[in-house]
Image: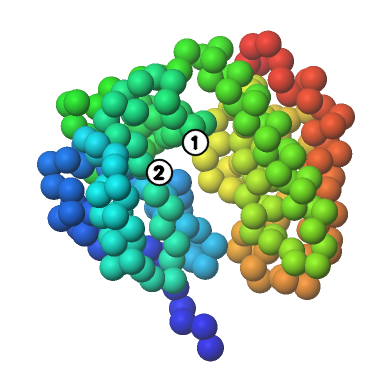
Amino acid sequence: MLHEITKENYTNTENNFFASILKFFGEDLLLYCVTGSLSRNEVIPRWSDIDVLMVMKECNLVTLSKIENTLKQTQTNIKIGVTFYSLSEFNNLFFKDSKTYLSIRYISEKYYIPRILSSEIKIQLLPEEMFRHNDAFEFARFVHDLKRELLIKDIRNERKVYKLSITLLKIALRQRGVVALGYKETIEKAEKNLPNFSEIHIMEPEEVMAKPEKIVERYETYGRIIEWVTKNTDTVFVKKPI
């Protein structure tokens, strides 16, 4: 029997990781922010990961070793994903990936509340037009990632396929000026706000886990998302949000 994972396990795992990383870095830890579902207290046990954004004064081999040791010391059956930067990297407007740009936006809008936020940290938002262009480039990358995953029939990674699908919908919604954070919210807003999408019905993660026998049917739905992208790209990527 699998050991039951609860929401409390997520909180305890993140608390332990934070205490350990703070012990290793002390005042050199300038930004520490939980992002994703745990930040909103919306974790789905056995599905969600823990995502953390961090900034240290420097990033070198010692930094990498400290983070690696912390992950090993606090390891559980809940995955912790860490995105980290040196101060100079983070404070450079253009030296970050798209996920970090989005996290910065959510920090500025109070969706994410950092545990540590030093006065040395610059919370800089990309100009709106540049943010939209960056989203468009990422959309194309995720579409191709999803296509490649759908080609793999012998070893299906449905969790990855599902998350790629939801990420595409979040980007498409942002292009139309609609913010969606969690899975349920994204699905509902996609059906309501995206052109020609109302007939595509996506299960929520809890139902996916509860009904493994429906995997073939769900993969047909993921394929329909690709079809939707190919037919509706021009209407999704309008010049300005609607």
The residue lying at 69 percent from left, 61 percent from top is: 157
The residue lying at 82 percent from left, 62 percent from top is: 153
Q: Is residue 198 left or right of residue 93?
A: right
Image vertical order of residue 208 relative to residue 239, above or below? below
Number of marks in picture: 2
* SS assignment at label 1: helix
The residue lying at 53 percent from left, 88 percent from top is: 1
Q: Is residue 193 left or right of residue 102?
A: right
Q: Hey, what amino acid is under mark 2?
A: Thr
Q: Is residue 97 left or right of residue 153?
A: left
- Disc 2 to disc 1: CB gap under 8 Å: yes
Pick the residue in front: 215 or 180: 215
Give the image location of residue 21, x and y in percent. Answer: 23, 54
Pick the residue in front: 172 or 82: 82
Q: Which of the two discs, 2 and 1, labels the residue nearer the N terminus? A: 2
Q: Is residue 14 visible?
A: no
Give the image location of residue 47, x and y in percent. Answer: 54, 62
Q: Quadrant of the C terminus?
A: top right
The residue lying at 65 percent from left, 24 percent from top is: 136
- Residue matched to label 1: 99
Q: Quadrant of residue 12?
A: bottom left
Farthest residue in the left direction?
A: 27
- Residue matched to label 2: 83
Q: Is residue 52 left or right of residue 170?
A: left
Q: How busy is the neighbourhood of tag 1: few (under 14 within 10 Å), some, or many (20 plus)?
A: few
Q: Identify the mark at residue 133; answer none if there is no mark.
A: none
